[in-house]
Image: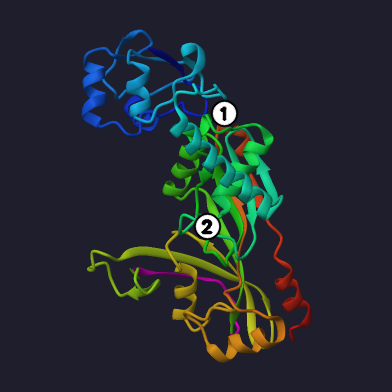
Amino acid sequence: MIKIWINEKDAGQRLDKYLRKYLAKSTSGFLYKMLRKKNITLNGKKAAGNEMLQKKDEIILFLSDETILKFGGIVPKGGVYDGEGTSLLQKSPQEEQRLEMRSEQYQKAYEAFGMLEIIFENEHILVVDKPSGMLTQKASQEDLSLNEWLIGYLMEKGEVNKITLHTFKPSVCNRLDRNTSGLVLCGKTLAGSQKISALLKERTLRKYYCMYVKGNITKGAQIEGYLKKDRQANRVELCKDAEDEDASYIKTIYKPLKNYRNMTMLEVELVTGKTHQIRIHLASIGHPVLGDYKYGYLEFNDRYKKKYGVTTQLLHASRLEFPQMEGEWADLSGLVLTASNPKIFQMIDESSEM
């Protein structure tokens, strides 16, 4: 038998979902059977599995150590698991090895990328300025990404460890393309991840990007349409209407910040957030993003490639504006976060003809 105390990182999720993380190799059928037979209880009572866990809730597993280890669980010394660094029993070498390998990867990512600029951080969320060329989430097992860096950073601070990561892993909440720089939202706790996800789904958290585009734009406007993704080619295309069941509605708002002889510095509000949305929308009106070799103009891009070494789209997630909020989220209410444009933006601005 072991006793589990729920901490704030794991609070806010259903009991059955938590159990599927703790006993990752078990089946849903096994878990519900154990709940029915009261071999798993919540706060000393029979549970159905759909209960929402709160901080300091008590789960008891009336299971043998062998069964818990078999299903990928942790057997703590003293029989109490609090998710805050409990030592493992030595009779679980496979689990020890797995957790050790993962923690080494997080530490490696933190060391590889160094200390990134953190724009905002509280107990639930973190907003970081991602540099161009860095993956938000890894594409293959060997990759190191911002997601691994985040956990490595929190491990360095002592806010998470290899044991707490067994049931909850902090993660990025919005994705930027590898070559897009700027603000990325991260959830440090489950409550933080859920709140950010809700704001993004409701479209109440406003996201702005800065870029250079071909040609002159003298007034702001908005573009609406439907987008379809070709996953094999990693491209998107615009559709005329929503008749195609694979098409998604997109909306982009833009305004000029500064005009040059042959281009414009533009600010774009990404109302919806679909793959390559900004790039395909601006290309569709004849103003592709500078450095965009997928949807843009070769001659225009090559000019700046030769002069400044621009080889990818110059897109920068420059500003986030939070809506009005109350209660435990009051410190985010109306918050505006900004990330300065990268040096390449400044170089182009200072040397381009007006």
Q: Is residue 90 left or right of residue 131?
A: left
Q: Is residue 309 left or right of residue 146?
A: right
Depth check, mark 1 against mark 2: the one in front is 2
98 within the magenta span: no
Report how far apart the C-alphas of labels 1 and 2 lie in the structure.
Answer: 35 Å
Q: Quadrant of the C terminus?
A: bottom right
Q: Determine whether 278 is above or below 285 in the image.
A: above
User: How many marks are shown on the rendered structure?
Assistant: 2
Mark drawn on residue 143: 2
Quarter where residue 62 is shown = top left
Residue type beneath disc 2? Asp
x, y percent for residue 88: 51, 23
x, y percent for residue 229: 34, 69
SS for tag 1?
helix
Q: Is residue 69 left or right of residue 254?
A: left
State the extent of the magenta-drawn residues as a range: 215-228
Q: Of 242 and 137, which appears nearest the observer?
A: 137
Q: Of 41 and 236, which appears nearest the observer?
A: 41
* Residue at screen point 50% across, 56% down: 142
Q: Quadrant of the N terminus?
A: top left
